[in-house]
Image (cartoon, rainbow, N blue to C red):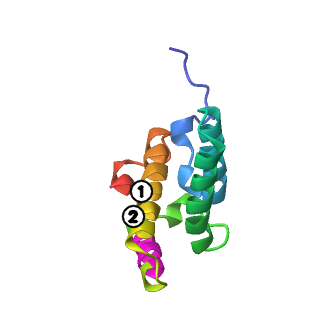
Amino acid sequence: MMAKRPGRRGWHDVDKTDIRVSELLQQFLMQQEDRNHSPKTVRWYSDMLGRFVTSLPTEARLRDIDAASIRVYLHNNRQNGASKFTLHAYARTLKTFLRWLLREGYVDEELHR
């Protein structure tokens, strides 16, 4: 294993919570395309997750996402008349995105739950 040069930061040293959620969404969507998901599937993720991102403050960072922000998002959609099917679709899609964030090392186990 190579020694780390003094003053150099590795991936684990970077504050990943400072990354904009919109940038993470774009990375997620690119990966879905690279995995040969159908254009319809990628559009689904883009639409569903795009709604969540626009519900966050402008230029929201990863640190702005927590269980409370997700609950508020789902609650607001329920209050606005979203069906049980739609709410389940939002929750399922958010769970997929959170699992991706976990696999890619952006979040720890805590946020995923």
The residue sitting at the top extreme is 1
Picture coordinates of residue 87, whole percent (x, y) = 42, 69
Total labels: the figure holds: 2
Q: Secondary structure at mark 2?
A: helix
For the record, the magenta segment spans 68-77
Give whichever of 94, 3 is nearer the camera.
94
Q: Residues within 10 Å of mark 1 (few under 14, many from 20)?
A: few
Task: Based on the picture, tell me whether residue 75 belongs to the magenta stretch.
Answer: yes
Q: Is residue 88 above or below residue 58?
A: above
Question: Magenta stretch: dominant SS?
Answer: helix
Q: Which residue is mark 2?
A: 88
Give whichever of 43, 50 is nearer the camera.
43
Q: Residue at x 35, y 48 (%)?
A: 109
Q: Could you tell me the amino acid type at mark 2?
A: His
Q: Residue at x 47, y 78 (%)?
A: 77
Q: Residues within 10 Å of mark 2 (few under 14, many from 20)?
A: few
Picture coordinates of residue 39, whole percent (x, y) = 66, 44
Picture coordinates of residue 57, whole percent (x, y) = 61, 74
Q: Could you tell me the amino acid type at mark 1?
A: Arg
Q: Secondary structure at mark 1?
A: helix
Q: Which mark is residue 92?
A: 1
Q: Residue at x 53, y 41 (%)?
A: 13
Picture coordinates of residue 102, whole percent (x, y) = 44, 44
Tag 1 and tag 2, C-beta contact below 8 Å: yes
For the C terminus, the quadrant is bottom left
Q: Residue at x 55, y 49 (%)?
A: 16
Q: Is residue 7 above or below residue 70?
A: above
CA distance separating discs 1 and 2 = 6 Å
